[in-house]
Amino acid sequence: MRLSQATLGELADGVARPLYDRGQGVGILHFGIGAFHRAQQAWYTDACLNAGEAGWMIEGVSMRSAAVAHQLDPQDGLYTVTERSSGAPRTRVVGSVREVLVAGRDAAAVADRIADAACRIVSFTVTEKGYCRQADGSLDIPLAREGFYPLLADGLARRRAAGLFGLTLLSCDNLSANGRQLSRLMTQYLEETDRDLAAWFADTCRTPDSMVDRIVPATGEDDLRDLEARLGLRDEGAVFTEPFSQWVIEDDFAGPRPGWDDHGAQIVPDVAPFEAAKLRMLNGAHSLLAYAGLDRGHTFVHEAIADPHLRALVEALMADAMPTIAAGPGQDLPSYAEALLARFANPALHHRLAQIAIDGSQKVPQRWLDTLAARQARGLRSPAILTGIAHWLRHVRGDVRAVDDPAARPLAELWHSAGRGGIVGAVFGPGGPLASHWQPDVKDVAAIDAHLDSLASVA
Ligand code: CS2
């Protein structure tokens, strides 16, 4: 039997479930309703609704496939979030998602929702590549036409025509200054397509920066089977995560918002220091564990962090990142580093290194290169990150394992044309795809080259 509104009563005792009327208004349209959104923003919103707030149901948009719609729509949008650690798992049913629209199939319905007066927030977890940026950070217009931009522009145009107020556009992706980037990219899109709308957007909409943090590994069939045995119901939309969760949002909304801060989120004047710490320390360490850990034969994050060689590298990366971050109020970076090491060691999460290794070309700039650039400006290096770069370059050569990255082809071609001796300069030197973030000096190149030489099977 499948989880749904009708079968909620069949759930095993002790599983928390929504206490509110799920027929109430939709206040949020969310682009990219993958596992992360379900375990994070929708989970905070569910807590708000359980506490008696109204009007904040979420309509999700799946950008690439109908799979999430097939998971959630037959379940009336219901799904479970299970927190895993060394203790017993804790499962709760989340009810804040009304239904899932599919970008390619339901474009008119998406614009209808955005144009609805009840909608106040459009939020995003479309991954780094979903913003359709070119190497220099500007919008790739032809690519953007395939993404969320035209859907959002349609909805906004209809709001403007109807004389409605603007929206809060809330990016929840792992980019630095994600709200400011979204604003800049959306403005560029509108200036190309509808200049009047660009002016309305600037006047009426807001794009707060936000830092999101919760480790949410991809769900596997084994996870679903175990859960079914515990719950007595099958949940195709289940997500599994850690007990930890953090969400820091810039206090810059165009209108009302849920009281996320009553349930653990932080609303602050400036997200930048939280974001820098999260991207450079957590995500930076993750990517280092992914590329170096796979090369050392590991499968999961908790295995890689138990490898003393990798743990030392991660500790060095964090120590190198810390002085580049101007800690904000209440931020204690050494304790943060300790807490991250403990989270990585969570034995129950089964977070695959291969999942983190996806889309490196989109992640490396804000995770590693910003630290390198900030250190370079002070005459300092980061040997740990240079080691990571060597592992990443080896990975994108494409002959060790499959490379899942929008730049997989151009990077493999660079390896082909520049060869082993020229690859570092070809990727990071003038004209290279990552040159706008950090440019290695002669010693950096030599250090990366030396690591590449030491990696077996690199010709
Ligand atoms: C990970 C992140 O897959 C990845 O690249 O580094 O998804 C990470 O688990 C989250 O950002 C944690 O908040």
Image (cartoon, helix red, strand yellow):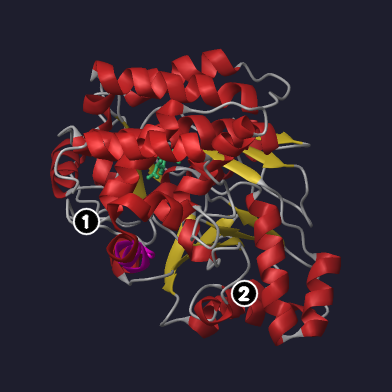
Q: Does the image show residue 276? A: yes
From the top left corner, tell me how far across and down residue 276 is, in percent. Answer: 61, 35
- In the image, 416 versus 338, the foreground residue is 416
| Residue drawn at (30%, 29%) of the image | 84
Quick check: 102 left or right of 88?
right
Q: Which residue is mark 1?
A: 2
At numbered mark 2, what does the secondary structure look like: helix, strand or loop?
A: helix
At numbered mark 1, what does the secondary structure look like: helix, strand or loop?
A: loop
Relative to residue 309, is residue 427 depicted above or below? Answer: below
Q: Which residue is mark 2?
A: 152
Chief secondary structure of the magenta portion = helix
| Residue drawn at (27%, 19%) of the image | 309
* Distance CA(mark 2)–CA(mark 1): 33 Å
Q: How many marks overall?
A: 2
Q: Residues within 10 Å of mark 1 (few under 14, many from 20)?
A: some
- Is residue 37 part of the magenta span, yes or no? no
Residue range corresponding to the magenta coloring = 406-414
Q: Does the image show residue 246? A: no
- Residue type at tag 1: Arg
If the picture is divided into quarters, which one holds ligand 1?
Answer: top left
- Is residue 408 part of the magenta span, yes or no? yes
Query: Mark 1 or mark 2, which is nearer the start of the sequence?
Result: 1
